Amino acid sequence: MLNQIVDVNAAVSNLISSYHELNHDFVDELQEEPSAVEFMRYVAKNRPFIVRGGASQWRAVRKWNAEYLSRVMGDEKVAVAVTPHGNADSVVVDPKDGTLCFIKPCEVEEPFTAFLKYLREQESGTNAQQAVKYAQTQNDNLRGEYTKLFSDVDGDIAWSRVALGRAPEAINLWIGNSRSVTALHRDNYENIYCQIIGSKHFVLLPPVETACIGEKFLPAATYALGCPKSPCGIRDDRTLEITRDNPAQEVPFATWDPDTPQKRATTFSHLSKPYQLTLSVGDMLYLPALWYHKVSQSCSTEGICCAVNYWYDMDFDGSFYATNDFVRNIALLKEPNVRS
């Protein structure tokens, strides 16, 4: 049995090492949008690329700023994620028992202008202990609650639609400040990510590194208001408490962070070779399905960061998804559940 375990370890290690030997250690940068055929070559290889300035002619890139967004959206109610540290949908330690949990944000609705004002004031350094707010609903919100802004961006990405043979499943708007960070995770979508205001900083891991990320089934929890007063008002991080979901459920999620590689490392984490890149205003990123990504952000001089992404359903036919699922299941078997 021991020899079998060693052989499995060697096979997983060889998979990761072989991938990096056969693929270059940078993300391709294009100076113009690809054709549908060129894009499909990247999809077939499951490799990301950046289009520098690919969205630079969009009305959103040319016109969006704090004044424009406030004027167009006014006091429309929008969904806002609230966390103490900008850590929505991430791993936290429950101080009550030391258990690692998957934490979801407290969700409130508030007038858009009030939300935007809050972001800008916090970024300027006012009331640094305030909880962090982020517009991050991943429910096609640009064609929903933010529909007044939808005409300022492309209705879809033509070369992606033609190549994939489908329209986007969702078009999402993201608005926050530099205190929000999206934890390492992956999506079952072909993702076209477009930077409108400020910058986004990505850490990317290919799907073959699933054994590196320490995925565990974690108890689900939600930040809840400890002092449920004026849900739209100013609050500091002490008013948010970790509350376990009832009924209880478990969520599979990465526990390893490539930015703190010694913490919660797996047997294979040292083999990871993350790709790091920054999107500036007008840039596009093709983020292939199942790639792990962690995202942080820098603001404009107005104290906000804004991006739009297009999710296209991935193709589950063929062997790609099934093979990745097999590798993921092997990884889940290799590492025991962990505490902090």
Image: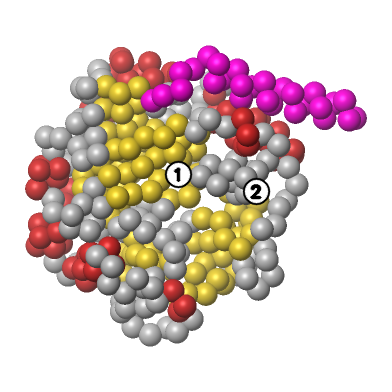
Separation of marks 1 and 2 at Cα, in angstroms = 16 Å
Query: How busy is the neighbourhood of tag 2: few (under 14 within 10 Å), some, or many (20 plus)?
Result: some
Residue at coordinates 20% horizontally, 22% vertically from top-left? 32
Q: Is the magenta stretch mostly helix, strand or loop?
A: helix
Q: Quadrant of the C terminus?
A: bottom right
User: Mark 1 or 2, which is nearer the eye?
Assistant: 2
Quick check: 92 above or below 232? above
As helix, strand or loop, the secondary structure at mark 2 comes to loop
Q: Magenta span has 65?
A: no
Q: Residue 255 in the image: x percent, y percent?
A: 60, 49
Of 40 and 93, nearer the camera is 93
Q: Residue 65 in the image: x percent, y percent?
A: 13, 54
Quick check: 289 above or below 317? below
Q: Magenta span has 22?
A: yes
**Which label sits on residue 294?**
1
Quadrant of res 210: top right
Q: Residue 84 in the image: x percent, y percent?
A: 44, 68
Mark 1 or mark 2: name the one nearer the start of the chain.
2
Q: Which residues, given as a range, are shown in magenta?
A: 1-27
Asked whether, in this view, residue 62 is left or right of residue 121, the answer is left
Q: What residue type is labelled 1?
A: Lys
For the question of whether residue 63 can be seen, the reply is yes
Asked whether, in this view, residue 217 is left or right of residue 141, the answer is right
Quadrant of res 144: bottom left
Quick check: 142 above or below 103? above
Q: In which quarter of the image is the N terminus?
A: top right
**Which label sits on residue 264?**
2
Residue at coordinates 70% horizontally, 57% vertically from top-left? 339
